[in-house]
């Protein structure tokens, strides 16, 4: 009977885990491994681009790739995992409950936005965390033109000045002009609890973000936190009320709630702490990858971030190691020494940095070309061709 490898999730980490696992089977000329991916749809949703227009098109089909690699796709939503019985229960497309047994399981269920208990957040704030919510936000922007002209209509408040908040905020001036007209006085305001613009980044990168914000007319409220949100806008803890018909929450993410069912150590974001092979130490049949994994990237104390850059490589290593454990092949400890940052800054351009110290290497149009190459090409799935896919799925191959 074939050994069963089940991958839960088909985002960047899950998709690449499947490719890498299939590669191990081929390299070992083995027909003893069955690989299955459990996810709602056989597609890769390009989440890093959800701040852009036309969100519905930001997906890549995976059916042909999985078929080419002899990977079974199971359409469903994982709801429960029992590590003692080695079973995952899921809700199938017909609404019924089904289960799948495994010899090894890779958790690649990703992350979701963290929503604290703030009055009005659930009722009045948008987010771009998932494709469905990003589409709702896009539809709302389209409908702003139907509202009477007012300060509130023309103002968008972005709550959270991290990576997603910055990319969305710097993109919004152009998106608002496209809908409301070039002559309309619009405002984009970022609410940030830190004491400076881009404070979680290097000083050099922070300065670029501040320069771009000034150039685009994006305002910042630093040292500020949201007290409440209602139909009229946002009230900050300092007492200021910002009139706005459009409030977007981008502050904080946490691992998918399925990870809470695993009895293991986790970090403040709910990510499962894993060893160098991406196994949960107390549960060696369970691997965590992508945004579900707290994994060290090097010997300097750096850990993987919740970004597609790390998810892609984490997926390749998890897929390789889980398959290798079933086929008695050589595992590869996860390492990802290189780290780059490429931040889209809307009409101003972009900024590209290298290293964990985030040394700025390119800005404006030069960096924009790099950003487009990354988000429109590099992070997309490989062609449905075994040779091409396996070459890209090698965890030891150069990535960035």
Image (spheres, rainbow, N blue to C red):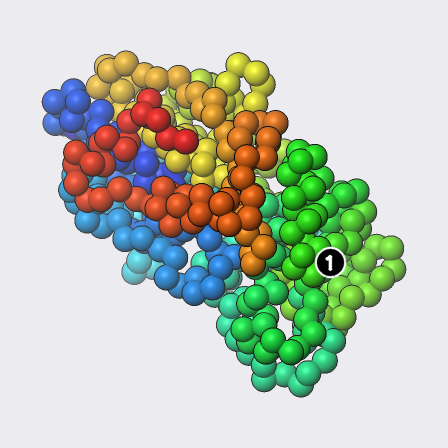
* Residue at point 27%, 20% (across, down): 324
Q: Does 56 appear above or below 70?
A: below
The reply to whether residue 256 is visible in this rendering is no
Q: Nearer the viewer, residue 344 or 90?
A: 344
Location of residue 129 in the rendering, given as x and y in whole percent from the top left corner? 52, 54
Residue found at x 30% / y 44%: 381
- How many circles with numbers are drawn on the protein? 1
Q: Is residue 67 left or right of residue 362?
A: left
Q: Quadrant of residue 88?
A: top left
Where 183 sits versus 289, above or below? Answer: below
Left or right? Give the position of 195 relative to 322.
Answer: right
* Nearer the observer, 274 or 260: 274
> How many residues crowd mark 1 within 10 Å: few (<14), some (14–19), many (20+)?
some
Q: Quadrant of the C terminus?
A: top left
Residue that badge 1 annotates: 219
Kindly state the secondary structure of the residue where label 1 is placed. strand
Question: Which quarter of the image is occupied by the N terminus?
Answer: top left
Q: Position of residue 267 (x, y in %)?
A: 60, 30
Residue 212 visible somewhere in the drawing: yes
Q: In the drawing, does residue 40 fall left or right of residue 183?
A: left
Relative to 87, is 153 above or below?
below
Which residue is pictured at 49% across the width and 59% down the height? 52
Between 205 and 96, the residue placed more toward the observer is 205
**Residue depicted at x 72% and y 80%:** 150
Expressed as whole percent of the image width and height from the top left, the position of residue 208 reads 65, 44
Picture coordinates of residue 289 (x, y %)? 43, 32
């Amino acid at each position: 009977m074939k050994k069963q490898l089940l991958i839960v999730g088909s985002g960047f980490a899950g998709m690449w885990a499947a490719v890498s696992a299939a590669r191990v089977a081929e390299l070992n000329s083995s027909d003893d491994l069955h690989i299955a991916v459990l996810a709602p749809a056989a597609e890769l949703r390009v989440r890093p681009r959800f701040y852009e227009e036309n969100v519905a098109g930001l997906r890549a089909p995976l059916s042909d790739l999985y078929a080419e690699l002899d990977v079974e796709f199971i359409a469903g939503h994982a709801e429960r995992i029992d590590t003692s019985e080695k079973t995952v229960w899921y809700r199938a497309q017909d609404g019924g409950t089904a289960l799948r047994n495994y010899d090894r399981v890779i958790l690649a269920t990703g992350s979701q936005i963290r929503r604290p208990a703030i009055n009005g957040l659930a009722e009045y704030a948008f987010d771009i965390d998932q494709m469905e919510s990003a589409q709702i936000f896009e539809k709302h922007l389209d409908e702003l033109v139907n509202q009477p002209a007012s300060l509130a209509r023309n103002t968008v408040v972005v709550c959270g000045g991290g990576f997603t908040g910055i990319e969305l905020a710097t993109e919004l001036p152009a998106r608002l002009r496209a809908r409301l007209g070039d002559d309309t006085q619009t405002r984009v305001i970022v609410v940030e609890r830190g004491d400076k613009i881009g404070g979680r980044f290097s000083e050099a990168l922070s300065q670029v973000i501040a320069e771009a914000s000034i150039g685009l007319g994006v305002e910042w409220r630093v040292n500020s936190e949201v007290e409440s949100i209602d139909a009229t806008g946002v009230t900050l803890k300092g007492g200021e009320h910002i009139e706005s018909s459009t409030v977007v929450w981008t502050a904080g993410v946490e691992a998918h709630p399925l990870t809470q069912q695993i009895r293991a150590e986790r970090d403040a974001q709910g990510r499962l702490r894993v060893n160098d092979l991406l196994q949960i130490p107390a549960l060696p049949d369970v691997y965590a990858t992508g945004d579900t994994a707290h994994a060290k990237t090097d010997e300097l104390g750096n850990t993987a971030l919740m970004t597609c850059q790390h998810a892609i490589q984490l997926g390749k290593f998890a897929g390789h190691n889980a398959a290798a454990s079933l086929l008695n092949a050589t595992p590869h400890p996860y390492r990802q020494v290189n780290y780059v940052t490429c931040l889209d800054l809307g009409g101003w351009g972009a900024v590209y940095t290298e290293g964990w110290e985030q040394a700025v290497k390119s800005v404006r149009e030069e960096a924009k070309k790099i950003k487009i190459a990354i988000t429109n090409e590099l992070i997309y799935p490989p062609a449905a061709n075994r040779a091409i896919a396996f070459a890209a799925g090698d965890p030891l191959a150069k990535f960035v």
